[in-house]
Image (cartoon, helix red, strand yellow):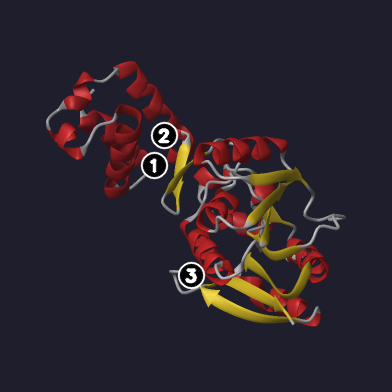
Amino acid sequence: MTYEAFWKPLRRRYDDAEAKAVARMVLEVSCGLTMTDIVCGKTEEQDEAELTRLQSRLLTGEPVQYVLGQADFCGRTFHVEPGVLIPRPETEELCRWAAECCRQQASARLLDIGTGSGCIAITLAAELPQTRVTAWDLSEKALQIAAANAGRAQVSVAFERVDALNISSSERFDAIVSNPPYICRREAADMETNVLDFEPHEALFVADDDPTCFYRSISNYAQRALGQGGMVFFEINPHYHDLVTRHLQELGFCTESRKDQFGKTRFVKGTKA
């Protein structure tokens, strides 16, 4: 199969530039081909049946990360598959902020709530080697994938099955990081079909009538689990920034907010007074 025959049908799903980028990514990861190899026609030397299979999956709208079984995050490669959320670039900013604030704490205890693929917990465990990292998720499949990712990254993370809406743990931590579900169901109409049709809805959506339920539950837990100066870091839906910060402040936290690369208020930090 020629390079053109591989990428041009993808225009049914992507514009030309994105179709070419997706095709190059697939050829690089699955076949080990560089752009020079592609220009030299080495695509035609690959297994055509395998290329057709990959192309067919992409044409259904399946995210390229699921097709390849991997996603990049903070300079590391994580295994992903249906059942765990694909790591987003903005979440890298959340990790950098948390690492920046926790770097000076010796032997800190850090908790990632809603770990999914484990990208946050594993990144912070690697960046903060003196920190003891725990990660929670309700999904057994997510915990299995995250544990395997931790093994590949050669970092130590304690994975536990915990419901973020019903936290009974008495564990104590110095920092809590969470990117919980925060998209209201009514926002689904504006979302891409490759997200709606393939990524786990339980990791994306909250009820329209209670959009900050996870933030309230986690903030309430943070209030009792963190000591003085302890920090909680959230990735948020910008629409509900005021609700999240107000609840933290009512619990006695000092709050700080940051914008993402697109200028949206996407992150909140609460520091226990």
Q: Image check: 179 left or right of 191?
A: right
The answer to whether the residue labelled 3 contacts the one labelled 2, judged by CB atoms less than 8 Å apart, is no
- The residue that mark 1 highlights is 13
Q: Nearer the viewer, residue 30 or 128?
A: 128
- Give the class, few, some or many, for how many residues have Cα within 10 Å of label 1's Cα (few <14, many ≥20): some
Which kind of residue does numbered mark 2 sit on? Answer: Leu
Q: Quadrant of residue 106?
A: bottom right
Any part of residue 245 in sight = yes
Which kind of residue does numbered mark 1 sit on? Answer: Arg
Q: Image check: 145 left or right of 138?
A: left
Q: CA distance from mark 1 to mark 3?
A: 27 Å
Q: Quadrant of the N terminus?
A: top left
Q: Earlier in the sequence, mark 1 or mark 2?
A: 1
Q: Earlier in the sequence, mark 1 or mark 3?
A: 1
Q: CA distance from mark 3 to mark 2?
A: 29 Å
- The residue that mark 3 highlights is 260
Horizontal and vertical percent for residue 144? 65, 35
Q: Quadrant of residue 183?
A: bottom right
- Give the class, few, some or many, for how many residues have Cα within 10 Å of label 2's Cα (few <14, many ≥20): many
Q: Quadrant of the C terminus?
A: bottom right
Residue ID at (50%, 54%): 88
Q: Residue furthest left?
A: 40
As drawn, the label of residue 80 is none
Residue ID at (46%, 57%): 89
Picture layout, residue 90 above or below residue 60: below
Any part of residue 235 in sight = no
Please name which of the two marks, 3 or 2, marks the residue nearer to the observer.
3
